[in-house]
Amino acid sequence: MNRSISLLLAGMLVATAAFAQRNPPFVKRTVTGLVTPESVVAWKDGYFVSQIGVKLEPAAKDGDGSIAFIRKDKVQSPRYFDDTLNAPKGLTIVGSTLYVTDIDHLKGYDINSRQKVFDLNLEGKAGVLNDITPVNDSQLVMTDSFKGDVWLVNRHTAALQQLGNIVTANGVVYDKATDELYVCSMGPDMNGKGQLWHRRLKVSGDAFQPVKNSPTGLFDGIVQLDASHLCLSNWIPVDAQFGGGQLHVYDLNSGSTFDILVRRSPADIALGKRDQLLVPVMLDNKLEIWSKESTESIYVPVITGGKPETASVPAGRSH
């Protein structure tokens, strides 16, 4: 699996060396100066970004990972927490504690004191922990991309419950209103044939199944745009000649998907405090921040058939 990741990253770099990027009209701001950004989460007037490190080795315990803090579209602190991290990936915040997956550890940091307050050691049990999402004030769900496990974690007691296994599980998001847990994957051996999976979290014995008409791809991140739309980031380009990547907006009601061409290597996407879409561009060491209007416009074509740059916000949008 380590070899698969190395070959994938090398291939993406070569394929996009002369990439003539079609810049989406709805990308508004770009933050530079990051080091292999993987995940992002909004905090007050800024953003935390996990950085795998210069070596670009997502499974190596090399100590060159970090969490940066961005404010006013600039990297204010490249290493916000003074603690050794190897290849930090998924980020989420509960209260004033930031949680991050780091290969085989789930760590928590108090944002105000910058001190580590939680460290769940899964050495020998986990492969490479990846994305993470909150369920409530006590529980988190995290994925293990190497072993495929999806875990429910109690952040107070550190108790673990396996929710299922999905080959190369990656992005995860939970819909509290419907009790649906969604996980996107990268496909066997990261072959780009991953799918979007779901199960009910609170129903004992429920199992993960692909959603209706699931899109396929090398999926990384996933967010819920509103009550009926999910957005997934996909490293597989629409046209291999031009590189790039895609965002897939999946309609939960119709089972249809709308595809959008974006920059290469869109990693663990997130939503900002003001309904912005946050897109870490891993191989270009950048973070794209889309405006609220741009974020809303990307899934309107699914409903109206209109153009992304001219579509209006749909009625009944859930915030």
Image: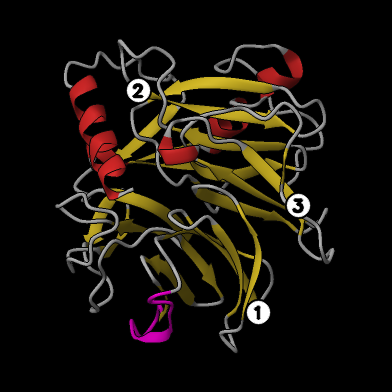
Query: Which sits in the foreground, 224 or 166?
Result: 166
Answer yes or no: do the residues labelled 3 and 2 have beta carbons within 8 Å? no
State which tag comes first along the sequence, 1 or 2: 1
Tell me the SS state at disc 2: loop
Is residue 299 rendered to the left or right of residue 4?
Answer: right
Could you classify mark 1 by the number of other residues whose Cα lies within 10 Å: few (under 14), some (14-19), or many (20 or more)?
few
The correct choice, above or below, for 265 with respect to 65 in the image is above
Using the rendered image of the protein, determine whether residue 56 is visible from the camera's viewpoint: yes
Using the rendered image of the protein, determine whether residue 16 is visible from the camera's viewpoint: no
What amino acid does circle 1 point to?
A: Ser
Q: How far is the residue under mark 3 from the one under mark 1?
A: 20 Å
Q: Nearer the viewer, mark 3 or mark 2?
A: 3
Query: Which image quadrant for residue 87?
Result: bottom left
What amino acid does circle 2 point to?
A: Gly
At horizontal 55% and vertical 60% (from top left) the residue drawn is 149
Disc on res. 199: 3
Is residue 56 rendered to the left or right of residue 237?
Answer: left
The residue singled out by tag 2 in the image is 244
Q: How far is the residue under mark 1 from the one under mark 2?
A: 38 Å
Tell me the SS state at disc 3: strand
Residue 125 on image: x %, y %: 45, 73
Residue 160 on image: x %, y %: 60, 78
User: What is the span of residues highlighted in magenta in the rendered image?
Assistant: 110-124
Could you classify mark 3 by the number of other residues whose Cα lies within 10 Å: few (under 14), some (14-19), or many (20 or more)?
many
The correct choice, above or below, for 26 with respect to 99 in the image is above
State which tag comes first along the sequence, 3 or 2: 3
Is residue 54 rendered to the left or right of residue 254?
Answer: left
What amino acid does circle 3 point to?
A: Arg
The residue singled out by tag 1 in the image is 138
